[in-house]
Amino acid sequence: MRDLTARAIAGCPVETAMTVIGGCWKLTLIQALIDSSVPLRYSELRDKAGEISDRTLTRSLRELEADGIVKRTVYAEVPPRVEYELTDIGQSLAPIIAAIQNWGDEWLHSYSKLSSPLI
Amino acid sequence: MRDLTARAIAGCPVETAMTVIGGCWKLTLIQALIDSSVPLRYSELRDKAGEISDRTLTRSLRELEADGIVKRTVYAEVPPRVEYELTDIGQSLAPIIAAIQNWGDEWLHSYSKLSSPLI
DNA sequence: CGGTATCCCACGGGATACTG
DNA sequence: CAGTATCCCGTGGGATACCG
């Protein structure tokens, strides 16, 4: 990827967005938080996301936190509890994700028509 | 990335879309074709995209073609001429790209407020 | 003009094991 | 419970050189 800070941020907002929400899991995690509308714990996110590995889940969440998309709250309890929720700017991704989702459906239909059946 | 065929296509349309339009250059190329509204030649796309390498440009275009997003037309002339244009499903990405672009702008503003100035 | 070929690197992501 | 640590691999993308 072209240097995210120099090119994406200075030049093209599309690339900025793709950098921030890029990586296959991030939209999935954001979607999970949108769906729940209430803060989710680490293990809840892991369950909802599917087959994500702990390492990838942690890294994705930390990047989303660093980019201001999610808010991470640690409760000093035993056993430990950590909750994740969307920030305002994170919430504002909802319509985009919905649009991408619809387009993905459309694409799938048109694609399966013009080529041999998938799988 | 989780196997694009098995998981993305079978499961989640968001991942399907991200697979098809993923990679940092694809949206940029699609955007260029949307902006022009007339077929573009290879060299025109290269100029509009910015600093893309030939190899990456060719590969991206071929993938977009394989996924039914762009149509590639070769004219048997000397010197050779190849034109690229969006398919219908490719055109339908326009609102999504616009949405992503707006979000990228928004994010940039909110982000530069909550952290130290970029660059 | 519109590509290929070859080589190389960075990084997202998985697997496994371990911990405060 | 919510992670870290370590290792490994596939792929996107750049650099350079060459071709019909």
Image: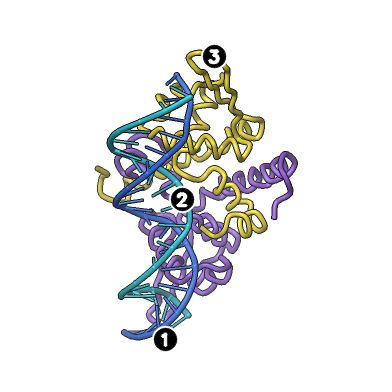
Chain colours: A purple, B yellow, C blue, D cyan
Q: Which residue is mark 3?
A: B77
Comparing marks 3 and 2, which lies closer to the viewer?
Answer: 3
**From this viewpoint, is residue A30 visible?**
yes
| Distance in Å between CA atoms under marks 1 and 2 | 34 Å
Q: Nearer the viewer, residue A25 or B86?
A: B86
Q: Position of residue B22 (x, y in %)?
A: 51, 45
Comparing marks 1 and 2, which lies closer to the viewer?
Answer: 2
| Element at label 3 | loop
Q: In the image, what residue occupies the spot 31% across and 44% down?
A: A5
Disc 1: CA contacts within 10 A as few (<14), some (14-19) or many (>=20): few
| Distance in Å between CA atoms under marks 3 and 2 | 40 Å
Comparing marks 1 and 3, which lies closer to the viewer?
Answer: 3
Q: Quadrant of the C terminus of chain B?
A: top left
Q: Nearer the viewer, residue A64 or A76?
A: A64
Q: Chain of mark 2?
A: A
Residue placed farthest to the top in the image? B78
- The amino acid on which the numbered mark 2 sits, given as a three-letter code, is Gly
Q: Which residue is mark 1?
A: A78
| Distance in Å between CA atoms under marks 1 and 3 | 74 Å
Disc 2: CA contacts within 10 A as few (<14), some (14-19) or many (>=20): some
Q: Are marks 3 and 2 in contact (CB under 8 Å)?
A: no
Q: In the image, what residue occupies the spot 52% across and 34% down?
A: B61
| Element at label 1 | loop
